[in-house]
Amino acid sequence: MLRHIMFAGALALTAGPGWADSHGHDHGASERTASPEGAEVYFITPTDGDTVSNPVTFRFGARGIGVAPAGANWPDTGHHHMLINIDPADVDLNEPFPFDDQNLHFGGGQTEVTLDLPAGTHTFVLIMADDFHVPHDPPLISEVITVTVE
């Protein structure tokens, strides 16, 4: 029960426009956390064009930016989000990522995940986000990889 209450509270913190963090930043506005110069995010495995079978383990990395849990307001850090079958051009970079099956959040600071995926060809992209799930400015977006699941 407590876990559900904590999760609902975390959603409430990230869902509404116009809310301010403990530093007075209004995250309902278009203000975004600056990304460190030269930082990048990337997939370690699988790689673009791979054919895999379930379960599929994705490992991802970051250069020039630290990985920290969501809610940790530490300088030059963020956490990964992996988008499945979503074109990054369709993402509103001024808003927190939605919580659904195509927008995976790694707010615990995770750098890998193992998934069971439907057979077929899928695209994956990583986008780093700040402590409130909002992409950095400029956004740190990996190359889109295409993976076929047998």
Image: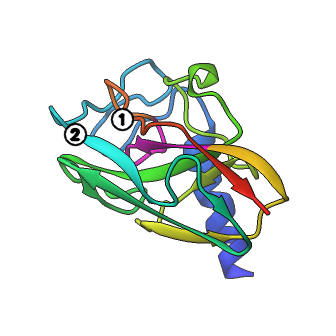
Q: Disc 2 on helix, strand or loop? A: loop
Q: Amino acid at mark 1?
A: Leu
Q: Is residue 141 visible?
A: yes
Residue under the image location 46 percent in, 20 percent down: 29
Quadrant in which residue 150 is drawn: bottom right
Q: Residue furthest bottom?
A: 1
Q: Position of residue 86 (x, y in %)?
A: 68, 34
Q: Position of residue 35 (x, y in %)?
A: 25, 34
Residue picked out by circle 2: 39
Compared to residue 146, the image places residue 25 above or below, namely: above
Compared to residue 119, the image places residue 126 above or below, namely: above
**Residue 40 in the figure: left or right of residue 145:** left
Residue picked out by circle 1: 140
Is mark 1 in CB contact (under 8 Å) with mark 2?
A: yes
**Residue 143 in the figure: left or right of residue 25:** right
* Numbered disc total: 2
Mark 2 Cα within 10 Å, few/some/many (few <14, many 20+)?
Answer: some
Q: CA separation, marks 1 and 2?
A: 7 Å
Q: Position of residue 16 (x, y in %)?
A: 62, 35
The foreground one among 82 and 97 is: 82
* 130 in magenta: yes
Q: Amino acid at mark 2?
A: Ala
Q: Disc 1 on helix, strand or loop? A: loop
Quadrant in which residue 30 is drawn: top left
**Residue 90 in the figure: left or right of residue 27:** right
The foreground one among 30 and 61 is: 61
* 112 in magenta: no
Q: Which residues are magenta?
A: 124-134
